Image (tube, rainbow, N blue to C red):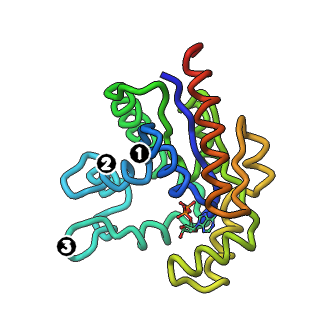
C-alpha cells in the first residue's frame, strides 16, 4: 500500500489535515497515539524504560512521568538515544502492523518528528505541512493556552521549515483559510489515488 508520512511543526495543521484526509475515507495511523499506548502501565516499552532510567521515572500511580522523562532527555543526547532505541523499533513495528490490517488505496502515517528523528524510511512519500511561524504561534497559543515564549521555544527546538521542505515530496501551505487547506488536500487526495495504482 502507498504510505504517506505526514509531518510539520507544532500547530502547523497536521491534525486538521489528517481529519481532511479521513473525510475522504483515508485511514490515518497516528504515531503519537501509538507512542503513548506503548508506554501504558504493563507494556513492554514501559518495563524497558524503567530498566534503563530507574523507577524514579514513574509517577505515584506507577504510570510514566512524561514530564520527568522529557527533562532527563532534554539536552542529553546519550539518554535521548537510549530512549529512542527502546521506542522507535516498537513504533515502527506497530505502524507496520496497523498498515497491514488496512484496506484502502493509500494511508497517511502522522509522524510529527519525522525529520528530527530521521524516520523517512517508514513511508513511500513525505507530505509536509508548511506554516509561517507567526501562524504557528497564533494558533498554538489559542489552542493550548501556552505563552508565545513557550511556543517559540518548542518551535526552535524542532526542525526548521527549510529542513522539512528539503525532505518533502509534497507540501501543503497552511497560511490561508481552512477552505484553502481543504482544497489542497482534495488535490493531493486525487494525486495519491493515482500514485496508489502504481505502487
Ligand atoms: P498540529 O496538529 O500540527 O499541532 P492543528 O491541526 O491542531 O496542528 O492546528 C493547530 C490549531 O490551528 C488548531 O486549533 C486548528 O483548528 C487551527 N488551524 C489549523 N489550520 C488552520 C487554518 N488554516 N485556519 C485557521 N485555523 C487553523
Image position of 162 (left or right of 23): right
Q: Earlier in the sequence, mark 3 or mark 2?
A: 2
Separation of residues labelled 3 and 1 (CA atoms): 22 Å
Q: Which picture quadrant has residue 74?
A: bottom right
Q: Number of marks in the image?
A: 3
The label number, if any, that marks residue 45 in the structure image: 2
Q: Counting other residues with Cα less than 10 Å from the Cα at mark 1, is it few (<14), some (14-19), or many (20 or more)?
A: some
Q: Quadrant of ligand 1?
A: bottom right
Q: Residue at x 60, y 57 (%)?
A: 77
Q: Which picture quadrant has residue 181?
A: bottom right
Q: Residue at x 45, y 46 (%)?
A: 23
Mark 3 vs 1: CB contact within 8 A: no
Of helix, strand and loop, which one carries label 3? loop
In front: 46, or 169?
Answer: 169
Q: Counting other residues with Cα less than 10 Å from the Cα at mark 2, is it few (<14), some (14-19), or many (20 or more)?
A: some
Locate the C terminus by quadrant.
top right
Image position of 138 (left or right of 52): right
Q: Position of residue 11 (x, y in %)?
A: 60, 66
Of helix, strand and loop, which one carries label 2? helix
Q: Tell me if residue 67 can be seen.
A: yes
Q: What residue is disc 1 on?
A: 86
- Please tell me whether residue 180 is drawn above or below residue 157 in the rendered image: above
The label number, if any, that marks residue 33 in the structure image: none
The label number, if any, that marks residue 61 in the structure image: 3
Q: Position of residue 162 (x, y in %)?
A: 81, 52
Q: Earlier in the sequence, mark 1 or mark 2?
A: 2
Mark 1 vs 2: CB contact within 8 A: yes
Q: Earlier in the sequence, mark 3 or mark 1?
A: 3
Amino acid at each position: 500500500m502507498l504510505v504517506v508520512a505526514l509531518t510539520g511543526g507544532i500547530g502547523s495543521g497536521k491534525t486538521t489535515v489528517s481529519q481532511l484526509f479521513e473525510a475522504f475515507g483515508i485511514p490515518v495511523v497516528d504515531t503519537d497515539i501509538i507512542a503513548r499506548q506503548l508506554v501504558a502501565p504493563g507494556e513492554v516499552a514501559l518495563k524497558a524504560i524503567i530498566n534503563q532510567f530507574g523507577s524514579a521515572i514513574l509517577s505515584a500511580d506507577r504510570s510514566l512521568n512524561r514530564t520527568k522523562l522529557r527533562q532527563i532527555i532534554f539536552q542529553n543526547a546519550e539518554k535521548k538515544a537510549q530512549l529512542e532505541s527502546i521506542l522507535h523499533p516498537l513504533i515502527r513495528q506497530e505502524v507496520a502492523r496497523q498498515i497491514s490490517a488496512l484496506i484502502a488505496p493509500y494511508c497517511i502515517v502522522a509522524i510529527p518528528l519525522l525529520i528530527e528523528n530521521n524516520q523517512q524510511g517508514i513511508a513511500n512519500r513525505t507530505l509536509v505541512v508548511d506554516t509561517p511561524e507567526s501562524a504557528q504561534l497564533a494558533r498554538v497559543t489559542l489552542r493550548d493556552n501556552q505563552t508565545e515564549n513557550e511556543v517559540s521555544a518548542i518551535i526552535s527546538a524542532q526542525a526548521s521549515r527549510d529542513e522539512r521542505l528539503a525532505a518533502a515530496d509534497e507540501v501543503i501551505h497552511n497560511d490561508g483559510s481552512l477552505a484553502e487547506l481543504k482544497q489542497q488536500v482534495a488535490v493531493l487526495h486525487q494525486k495519491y489515488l493515482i500514485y496508489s495504482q502504481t505502487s
